């Protein structure tokens, strides 16, 4: 079974390109681009699923140094994530155990303005309409959560 997976975001790319993988498909975000959108179909199963977004090849031209200090850098921000046209709130995917970490050190990263190599795990429940109930039954329920149709 496949679903439609969409990401919209803002970015700043000072180098040639900022390359990412979404579920092993390659995408390039080009120099001077300020926004991006990725739409693809992904294979899933009923129940819990995980989509991996990765940026592991980080060329030197994505960061500008002067006297050993960072003075400018490229970054991505994931502003909207949609599954089958349902917008997933930040709290919804955070409560589902999603996280972002450095691909080598495994140190946790802040989820906005990602400007270094990273792996983002987006965990979700399918069917989407049952996600809130799946969270409520688990140990990761941290308060009011929900979804809305876009």
Image: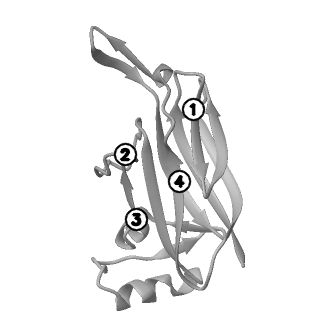
- Residue at the image position 41 percent from the left and 62 percent from the top: 90
Q: Residue at x 54, y 45 (%)?
A: 9
Does label 2 or label 1 sit earlier along the sequence?
1
> How far apart are labels 4 and 1 at the CA level?
19 Å
Instruction: Name the mark nearer the viewer: 4 or 1.
Output: 4
SS for dot 3: loop
- The numbered disc on residue 120 is none
- Looking at the image, residue 74 sits to the left or right of residue 102; the answer is right
Camera-nearest residue between 105 and 83: 105
Residue 96 is at least partly visible in this image: yes
The residue positioned 42% from the left and 71% from the top of the image is 92
Mark linked to residue 34: 1
Report the front residue among 21 and 149. 21
- Is there CB contact under 8 Å for labels 4 and 2? no
Vertical order, 35 against 103 (above or below): above
Label 1 crowding class (10 Å Cα cut-off): few <14, some 14-19, many 20+? some
**Which SS class for mark 4?**
strand
| Disc 4 to disc 3, C-alpha distance | 11 Å
Q: Residue furthest front?
A: 104
Secondary structure of residue under mark 2: loop
Whether residue 150 can be seen here:
no
Pick the front one: 110 or 86: 110
The answer to which of marks 4 and 1 sits earlier in the sequence is 1
Disc 4 packing (10 Å; few <14; some 14–19; many ≥20): some
Marks 4/2: CA distance?
15 Å
Q: Which residue is mark 4?
A: 53
The first of marks 4 and 2 along the sequence is 4
The colour scheme used here is one colour
Q: Secondary structure at mark 1?
A: loop
Q: Which mark is residue 98?
A: 3
Q: Nearer the viewer, mark 2 or mark 1?
A: 2
């Amino acid at each position: 079974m496949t679903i439609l997976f969409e990401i919209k975001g803002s970015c700043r790319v000072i180098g040639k390109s900022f390359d990412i993988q979404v579920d092993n498909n390659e995408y390039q975000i080009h120099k001077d681009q300020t926004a991006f959108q990725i739409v693809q179909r992904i294979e899933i199963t009923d129940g819990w699923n995980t989509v991996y977004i990765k940026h592991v090849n980080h060329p030197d031209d994505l960061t500008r140094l002067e006297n050993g200090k960072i003075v400018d850098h490229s970054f991505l921000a994931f502003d909207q994530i949609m599954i089958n046209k349902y917008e997933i709130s930040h709290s919804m995917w955070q409560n589902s155990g999603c996280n972002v970490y450095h691909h080598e050190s495994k140190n946790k990263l802040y989820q906005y303005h990602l400007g270094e190599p990273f792996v983002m795990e987006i965990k979700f429940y399918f069917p989407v309409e049952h996600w809130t109930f799946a969270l409520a039954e688990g140990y990761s329920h941290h308060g009011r959560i929900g979804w809305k149709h876009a």
